[in-house]
Amino acid sequence: MSRVGRLLAYGTVAAVLGAALAAPVLAPRDPNALGDDPTRDRRLAPSVQHPLGTDDLSRDVYGRLIHGTRVSVSIALIAAALIVAIAFAWGTTAAFAPAWLRGAMMIFADVVYSVPRLLVVLSVLTFTGQLAPATLAVVLGLAGWAPLSRILYRAAVAARRAPSTESAMALGVGRVRIAFSHVLPALRPHLVEGACMAVAVVIPLEAALTYFGIGVPRPTATWGRLLDDAGADPLGAWWLVVFPSAVIAATVMAMNYLASDARAPRLTAEAK
Amino acid sequence: MTALLEVENLRVTYAGAQRDVAAVAGVSFAVAPGEVVALVGESGSGKTATALAIIGLLGESARIEPGSAIRFEGRDLLRLGEPEFRDLRGRRIAMVFQDAGAALNPVMRVGEQVAEAALVHGERDKARARAMAVAMLDRVGLPDAARQARAYPHELSGGMKQRVMLAIALLLKPSLVIADEPTSALDVTVQRQVLSLLLELQRESGTAVLMITHDLGVVAETCSRALVMRRGELVESATVDDLFHAPRHAYTRELLAAMPRLARPVPPG
């Protein structure tokens, strides 16, 4: 990708993370507070006072977007961390396990993988009802580790059988050291890529679930909640749809870029 | 003469999809201390499987049949537990691989990789291991070894990488080095340098070398004795002189005939 593309991608991610971290500073007002006169302040178009307008209940969209970023990003990060952690543990354990156990572990991963993620999450939510953001993040994480575990498993097996690993073994290097000095470095790009992809998948999933009213409960602002708040007649108030959609789309695209950037072979200083 | 390495009736079988394949079908030979022996044969003749069996690195799809024995320095390697075997590897038996570019860890500095040999075998002082590594890299002819020790494998040429492999293998002065096609990935001129370096080091440390190769030129230049393998069996065991001048087995004669030679110069006129 071009320098501009790279700048845009990293800039987007930095801005989103910055907004999530500094939400109370960037938007000190309670994101759920109504306007001074709820009837008059409904569905106001963007202005100096409300840079992104107000919604049906006269709440400031800018404030809700900033605080929603905090919640949506937290959910995505927790879920992604869980996905990477479980996939790493499962994949590498299988790669070093005896043949029968390895096969069983990967069949289990395939079974988990074969059940659509949305279906898993929907069934869980049917039993539990709407969940607090952190709990929802855990559910999303538990439902999404299988594909990455397969990727990490393959990469670990390949690294284990690589000639450099074999020559280290011929040197009498032990298993633990093999794992840390040969297998782990080979997994690093897959881990970074997997983490970025997990974020890129979880963000729209949370938005969709919340939009359909089964994700994060009202009135907590998240990116999905903002879309839901656009209400039945979004065309009359474009700012209610455009800003959250743009933020979601930009973030997902940026994370996809980061993922492919992690996978791309890097030119060394001399090769440039 | 007591043998350093004695392989007796070695049989290695690989589990195939339909049926098992015997890669090594009852091979026996011995290597004396300090001797340079060639193990010759075409691809698939079982020479690498033999080598991997000796150093205990056959994959899990391979199995050593009962009745086989590999004795090294008086111990039966096939009865050795993994921790004891690991202690032998790199210290008493070392291996030089064919493609140094693939065999070196791409994300570790070469000096560290040489030092690792010492560190995994009881050297606790990292600085001393590093000093040993630099001295060894200097010995194998890496120019400006102290600086080059900080290089990553991709920064070195093929010949230099193979020199690093030799440094790793010979750092702890093992009594046996198994060299699996150590020069076939190199240019001919570089091949000669690496081979003569291997022989120099071998003489210095009194190490025996089992040279696995399909290149009879390498055999003629470096080895005193040659074992010829074909389809998992040992078909000939002879001194290199006899091998080239009085080959007994038909297969050996075929191998010799297949060797490229310089054509006789065309007489002028």
Image (cartoon, rainbow, N blue to C red):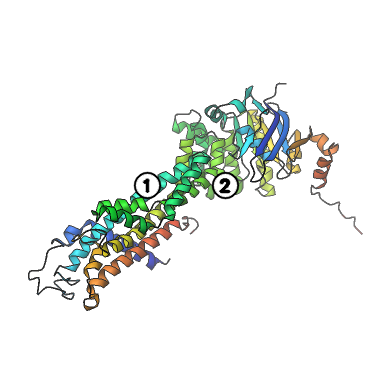
- For this view, does B77 lie left or right of residue A198? right
Q: Are marks 1 and 2 on the same chain?
A: no
Q: Secondary structure at mark 1?
A: helix
Q: Nearer the viewer, residue A11 or A120?
A: A120
The image quadrant of residue B85 is top right
**Quarter of the image where one finds residue B68:** top right
Q: Which residue is mark 1?
A: A85
Outermost residue toward the bottom in this view: A236
Is B170 on the left or on the right of A98, as rendered? right
State which chain disc 2 sits on: B
Residue B32 in view in this figure: yes
Could you tell me which secondary element the residue under label 2 belongs to?
helix
Residue type for callout 1 = Ala
Label 1 lies in what chain? A
Q: Is B33 located above or below residue A199 in the figure?
A: above
- Residue A147: where, in percent of width, then height? 43, 53
What's the CA distance linking mark 1 and mark 2?
Answer: 30 Å
Kind of residue indicated by mark 2: Ala
Label 1: how many residues lie within 10 Å, few (<14), some (14-19) or many (20+)?
Answer: some
Question: In the displayed image of the protein, which residue is found farthest to the left?
Answer: A37
Spot occupied by residue A229 in the image (x, y as percentages of width and height)? 21, 68
Residue A206 or B6: which is nearer the viewer? Answer: A206
Is A170 situated above or below A253? above
Total label count?
Answer: 2
Q: Which residue is mark 2?
A: B102
Residue B54 locus on image (x, y percent): 64, 32
User: Is mark 1 in CB contact (under 8 Å) with mark 2?
Assistant: no
Residue beneath the point at 81% across and 41% down = B251
- Would residue B140 be seen by someone viewing this image from the given angle? no
In the picture as drawn, the residue positioned furthest to the front comes out as A127
* Location of residue B101 with respect to B239 vertically, above or below: below
Quarter in which the N terminus of chain A is drawn: bottom left
